[in-house]
Amino acid sequence: MTAFPFDIVGFDLDGTLLDSHRDLAHAVNHALGLDGRRGVPASQVRAMVGGGARKMLTRAFEATGGLPDEARFEQLHAALLAFYERNISAETRLFPGGEAMLDQLAARGARIAVVTNKLERFAVKIFAELGLSDRFCAIIGGDTLGPGRGKPKPDLLQLMIARGGGGRAAYIGDTTYDTRAAAAAGIPCVAVSFGFSDLPPRELGAAAVIDHFDELVPVLERL
């Protein structure tokens, strides 16, 4: 077998490795309900994901009458986070083919990481509850390095490479936050077409686009 070309393969979480939109929608609608607002369908919340919970909630408020004042926003944001933490993996699962794909990467000697704009404690909790924690050499969240250093800045991907022991890295994502961060870090990005993309997947600027995780290892071997 030809040597696998990447030492580290990193994944975004929401909309890339995990289909989490239903649990995110429940949390968003909990916060909206506390403010006396109508809920939004889970399918609509898919398009609001990206950049962290604060941005997601902002988009939900904008879709249901506009932003509340700052103090009320912070209160509802805290309520969303608390609800989500209690219910973080109720309906969240790997996308189809995800487990076999992770097995294939491990068999090729790749170190696997997660880099997300979700709070680190949430990312750690969700993978623990799904029984997946042992698969990753690093789980890095949007707050791991402190405020203002999440994607699309390259900082978290640079940390992924350091924690992964160095070497050639690739990143897998579903939004412009991911492709821009990878470009800034100087590593190739593969986009998934089944995620929560903020642009049509083939307009994200990725090195390649896949429609199913069965395609990922062969695509990485060609990059």
Image (spheres, rainbow, N blue to C red):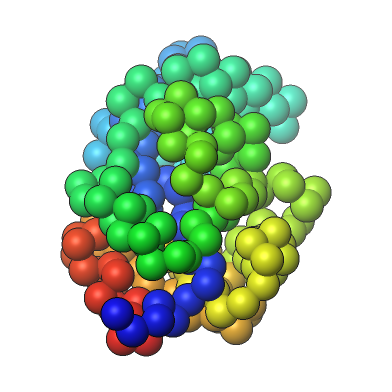
Q: Quadrant of residue 22?
A: top left
56 or 148: nearer the viewer:
148
Residue depicted at x 65% and y 23%:
78
131 or 197: nearer the viewer:
131
The residue furthest front is 1
191 or 133: nearer the viewer:
133
Residue depicted at x 40% and y 81%:
3
Q: Where in the figure is residue 63, as x and y percent of width and height?
A: 40, 39
Residue 223 vertical position relative to residue 55 in the rendered view, above or below: below
Whether residue 55 can be seen here: no
40 or 216: nearer the viewer:
216
Residue 134 vertical position relative to residue 105 in the rendered view, above or below: above
Residue 112 vertical position relative to residue 48 in the rendered view, above or below: below
Residue depicted at x 78% and y 52%:
145
Is residue 163 toward the left or the right of residue 7 in the image? right
Q: Where in the figure is residue 4, as x and y percent of width and height?
A: 40, 78
Is residue 222 toward the left or the right of residue 35 in the image? left
Q: Quadrant of the C terminus?
A: bottom left
Q: Where in the figure is residue 135, as x and y percent of width and height?
A: 47, 45
Whether residue 95 can be seen here: yes
Q: Quadrant of the N terminus?
A: bottom left
Is residue 150 toward the left or the right of residue 59 in the image? right
Q: Where in the figure is residue 139, as x and y percent of width and height?
A: 60, 47
